[in-house]
Image (cartoon, rainbow, N blue to C red):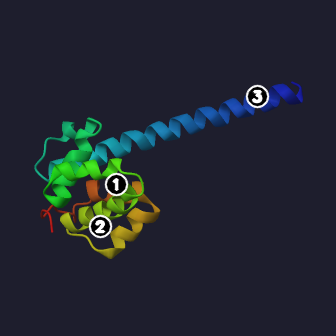
């Protein structure tokens, strides 16, 4: 096997591994969102619908789902996204630690909120 064929084989293996890893993370995140919605008393399937799931997240965090429209405004969406993360943490009874985790490792934070037995939805704060 020449060097070019070897490079293609390695590239294909890395690409395939990356795809499998991404799909596993995607499935875990879908399940985490589903469980978070169920903890809040919302049907889990609503987490699967794009934009509608964002509407529900804003409803869970702020009590007003229509505020998700603020995410459509450039620059404002960054600030609103950070506030949403903070309010989600508070709505699930969590504090600064999980908020910081959500800033730096958001997938881990969402998994924690979804799967942890220590996390309960208490409503908008």
Residue occupying the far right of the picture: 2
Write the residue at 13% across / 57% down: 63
Identify the secondary structure beneath mark 1. Answer: helix
Residue 80 image point, x, y percent: 32, 60
Which residue does the numbered mark 2 point to in the structure image? 86
Task: Residue 64: give x, y in percent of width and height.
Answer: 14, 54
Position of residue 46 relative to residue 103, above or below, is above
Q: Indicate left or right for 120 with 102 as reference.
A: left
Closest to the observer, 66 or 35: 66
Q: CA distance from mark 1 to mark 3?
A: 35 Å
Specify the label residue 111 is tagged with. 1
**Residue at mark 3 to residue at mark 2: CA–CA distance:** 45 Å
Q: Is residue 83 left or right of residue 13?
A: left
Q: Earlier in the sequence, mark 1 or mark 3?
A: 3
Q: Specify few, some or many for label 2: CA neighbours under 10 Å numbering under 14, 14-19, or 20 or more.
A: many
Q: Where is residue 102 shown, x and y percent of the image?
A: 38, 63
Residue receiving disc 3: 8
């Amino acid at each position: 096997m020449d060097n070019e064929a070897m490079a293609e084989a390695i590239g294909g293996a890395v690409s395939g591994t990356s795809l499998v890893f991404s799909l596993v993370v995607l499935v875990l995140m879908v399940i985490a969102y589903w469980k978070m919605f169920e903890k809040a008393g919302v049907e889990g399937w609503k987490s699967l619908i794009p934009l509608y799931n964002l509407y529900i997240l804003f409803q869970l965090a702020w009590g007003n789902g229509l505020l998700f429209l603020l995410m459509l405004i450039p620059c404002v969406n960054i600030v609103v996204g950070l506030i949403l993360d903070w309010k989600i943490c508070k709505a699930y009874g969590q504090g600064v630690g999980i908020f910081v985790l959500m800033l730096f490792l958001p997938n881990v934070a969402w998994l924690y909120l979804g799967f942890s037995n220590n996390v309960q939805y208490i409503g908008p704060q």
